[in-house]
Image (cartoon, rainbow, N blue to C red):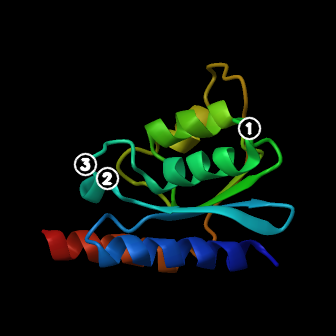
Amino acid sequence: MNDEYYMQKAYHEALKALKIDEVPVGAVIVRDGKIIARGHNQRESKNMATAHAETIAIQKACRKLNSWRLDDCTLYTTLEPCLMCTGVIIQSRIQRVVYGAHDTRWLAFDKIIHSQYPVNHIPMVTKDILIDQCSKIIKDYFKQKR
């Protein structure tokens, strides 16, 4: 299986968010070729600012592995991680991050990962996987909201 396969699974999570009128972002965490955790945005439905797709998936993976260290895992997310999620990714030591659409408002992930400021962990990064599909669902969602 390849990056497109797992990103498609993350996209399926984004569709779940869309169905409950959340910003359509989805994430999956993969270890040894198996999906061990999934998440989609639930900020509105849970009334919780931290209920982003990435943080939900990371929490589930940590519980499943009984460890806060996810250093042998890959996170697939349909949207470039925000500032908060970037911090959680760094803290959980995720080995690799793969994302689809770019976050054109904040660009936090790339700025932090490629900054001159030292962080304790820098994951490998792969961008633009299913970028058109991942970008379209976000753009369409916000077009409909405005």
Front-lying residue, 117 or 90: 90
Q: Which label was assigned to residue 54? A: none
Do residues under tags 2 and 3 come within 8 Å of each other at their CB atoms? yes
| Residue located beneath label 1 in the image | 67
| Residue 112 left/right relative to 71 | left
Q: Nearer the viewer, mark 2 or mark 1?
A: 1
Q: Is residue 138 above or below residue 87?
A: below
| Residue located beneath label 2 in the image | 43
- For the residue carrying disc 3, how many other residues have a C-alpha within 10 Å: few (<14), some (14-19), or many (20+)? few
Residue sitting farthest toward the left: 146
Q: Residue at x 54, y 33 (%)?
A: 87
| Residue located beneath label 3 in the image | 47
User: Who comes first in sequence, dot 1 or dot 3?
Assistant: 3
Camera sees residue 100: no
Q: Tag 3, which secondary structure? A: loop
| Residue 71 left/right relative to 44 | right
Camera sees residue 56: yes
> Which amino acid does the dot numbered 1 rest on?
Ser
Q: Residue at x 83, y 47 (%)?
A: 72
The Cα atoms of the two marked residues, 2 and 1, are separated by 25 Å
Tell me the quadrant of the picture where the C terminus can be found.
bottom left
Give residue 93's position: percent from left, percent from top. Answer: 72, 36
